[in-house]
Amino acid sequence: MGNKISIVSDGSLDLSREMTDKNDIRVVPFYVSFDGKTYQKEIDELDIREFYQKMVDNPGIFPKTSMPSVDDYYRVFLPLAKEGTPVICICITSKFSGSMQSASTARDMVFEDFPAAQITVIDATVNTVLQGLYVLEVCRLRDLGWEYERIVRRILEIRESGRIFFTIGNIDYLKHGGRIGKLAGLAGSALKIKPLITLREGEIFSSGLARSREKSMQKVIGLLEDYLDERSVRPGEYSFAVGYGYDYEEALRFKEMLSGLVRRRLGIEEIGVYQIGATIGVHTGPHPLGVGIIRRADWEG
């Protein structure tokens, strides 16, 4: 492997194992529990499909996640430091999890024995499919042969451009998980109302309500279009993906609803469709659906 830069991320990045293998991304998984006692590693021990099926079959049970431990990161960082491989580690927004703190502590432990090691831990300020897109932008620069410090500088520059616009089935899981925060005004909403949510700079914000799933999907597309207008986005400038939970068929239908806009405004012919993992799924419930968008790291303009 030589000194090729190693890219590490926690399990919130929600890329398939096929994609992480193909892009040589090392994933440090979160842990998931349905009973508050037994925790399983996401993907490694609990398949995402199985996770969603359990939620759908047991609507009164609210699963929990636990962040990767210091030791989980240490076991990844140490061999890379020993062989002199530089590391860039991307963690879920620190507003949602202590994963970055675990990674930072593990990095400091490695530095004690290998003070010359290169390990940069970065707060993605995003999560789920958008974190996946962000990590893929790091891979893009690595594969273009950019040098280490230049990659770090550039990915910090594009970070604030990331947005997630999404809707959920209902607000129960957000309320139960204590993630209601800036969405407090939605707490009393009727069950039939579908909330619209925007994630930006590490936090979630209410972006309105819709009276049906179909309308909520259309409003997510409206939020995306507003953002493209606000940023005067040009074709080729941004990376984009659809994120979904339990219902793949619905995700494909949503992709079709988006395809004309995405082709015209972003110059993207084939939209990526990624399954949202357990780290976020425990808070959204089984029916999150939305889009992630971020500026391409190699865009010059």
Image (spheres, helix red, strand yellow):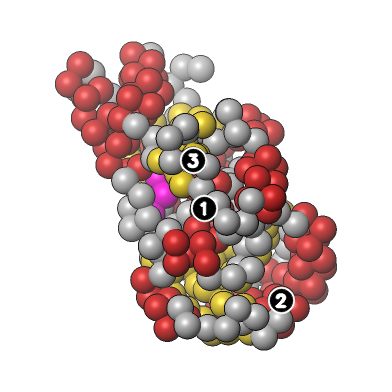
Q: In this view, does 96 lie to the left or right of 259?
A: left
Picture layout, residue 159 above or below residue 52? below
Residue at disc 3, secondary structure? loop
- The amino acid beneath tag 3 is Asp
Q: Is residue 161 left or right of residue 219?
A: left
Q: Which of marks 1 and 2 is nearer the N terminus?
A: 1
| Alpha carbon separation for disc pair 1 and 2 | 22 Å
Which of 217 and 210 lies nearest the eye of the viewer? 210
Q: Is residue 91 located in the magenta-colored stretch of the structure? A: yes
Establish if 204 lies above or below 280: below
Residue highlighted by disc 1: 62
Instruction: Quote the CA–CA distance across marks 2 and 3.
Output: 30 Å
Q: Residue at (42%, 49%) from the top-left corner?
A: 92
Q: Give the range drawn in magenta.
A: 89-93
Q: In which quarter of the image is residue 136?
A: top right
For numbered disc 2, what is the local secondary structure?
A: helix
Q: Residue 200 carries which label?
A: none
Name the residue that disc number 2 marks.
213
- Determine if the magenta segment contains residue 199: no
Give the foreground label among 2 and 3: 3
Q: Is residue 232 above or below residue 301?
A: below
Circle 1 SS class: loop
- Above or below, comparing residue 8 to residue 216 in the picture: above
State whether the magenta stretch is mostly helix, strand or loop.
strand
The CA span between labels 3 and 1 is 9 Å
Near-viewer residue (143 or 28): 28
Q: Which of 32 and 130 is in front in this view?
A: 32
Q: Where is residue 151 in the image (x, y as percent from the top left)?
A: 42, 44
